[in-house]
Image (cartoon, grey):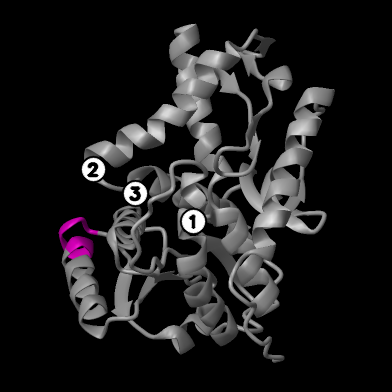
Amino acid sequence: MNGPVVGVVGAGAVGQTLATGLVAAALPERLLVVARRAGQVQGLAADLQDLALTARSRSRVEAGDVADLHGCDAVVIALRTDFKNTAERDIRRGGATANAPALGELARELCGYRGAVLVVTNPVDLMARRFADVSGCTRVFGIGSNLDSARYRLLLARYAQVSPELVRGHVIGEHGDRAVVCASTTTVGGQPIEVPMRTVLDDLQRRPALIRNGIGRTRCGPTGAVLSALRKVLGLVDGVEELSVPYGDVYLGLPLRFTGGMAAPCLPPLTRSEHLCLDSAASSLRDAYTHLPALPERITA
């Protein structure tokens, strides 16, 4: 049986790291690299081919174009237009105006695509919704809340001085300033724990800034999140991932239980405060979506 075919759109810092992680993990049988600049695509594909050989990875790497993506089982979108992010608040939304047109154009070209789409481009909740609205694709997932959840478990494990594998808990809502920590259902070793919310929230805010200030852009964490999510989305393993999916008329992060590649929401019980925070995130994302550049005309397949 042939393995999955995965396309990566974007050959910048994040796209390069994602593609490297996929090849190193030998997740796809065939990896298709797509970007706006032909020279960049050819160069990255050649470099990844060298990696596949030296790492003894089964992944076959090819340079391609958008039309080739229709033959993929999954497409990972990590495109980013050139812009300077000057936002001091809602930093992840800083690229909304710049990235939305490019992502919308890609969505038009992938209209009717039947595979799974993982959106990494920020602001991920808004871009996942934009891609779904324009393309009509039904299996669109935003990467973001699963990375937030992984960071939460790591930080809480350090606080509790236990292995991160013993921590169970979710961060949902927006991948941004309105992330919602599900503290009321968090457990360590199967037991409830009193989460030091102020400390945790401060650390969750500081961690992305620490990474940006040190290396310019978060890239390795999203790569791990994509690898984990792809295995579930492609039906290679079952399990839970926090991904951005429809919540009413918006996209935001929710826990999803994957079985054989099919996803079902598994939102834990929320306190009144947690529910209000989730609805507040939805309201803010709803308003932000109305300020995106005009939606491209939808093409019917």
Q: Earlier in the sequence, mark 2 or mark 1?
A: 1
Amino acid type indicated by mark 2: Ile
Taking 210 as reference, is 101 left or right? right
Q: CA distance from mark 2 to mark 1?
A: 18 Å
- Does dot 3 land on a helix, a strand or a loop? loop
Residue 156 drawn above or below residue 133: above
* Magenta stretch: helix, strand or loop mostly: helix
The residue that label 1 is drawn on is: 122
User: x, y (%) of residue 218?
Assistant: 35, 45
Q: Earlier in the sequence, mark 1 or mark 3?
A: 1
The residue that label 2 is drawn on is: 215
Amino acid type indicated by mark 1: Asn
- Does dot 1 land on a helix, a strand or a loop? loop
Residue 10 sits in quarter: bottom left
The residue that label 3 is drawn on is: 219
Is label 2 in contact with label 1 (beta carbons under 8 Å)?
Answer: no
Q: CA distance from mark 1 to mark 3?
A: 12 Å
* Residue 194 visible to the viewer: yes
Q: Which residues are magenta?
A: 51-56
Amino acid type indicated by mark 3: Arg
Seen at 73% across and 18% down, the residue is 184
Taking 115 as reference, is 287 left or right? right
- Does dot 2 land on a helix, a strand or a loop? helix
Seen at 51% across and 70% down, the residue is 1
Is label 2 in contact with label 3 (beta carbons under 8 Å)?
Answer: yes
* Comparing labels 2 and 3, the label whose residue is closer to the camera: 2
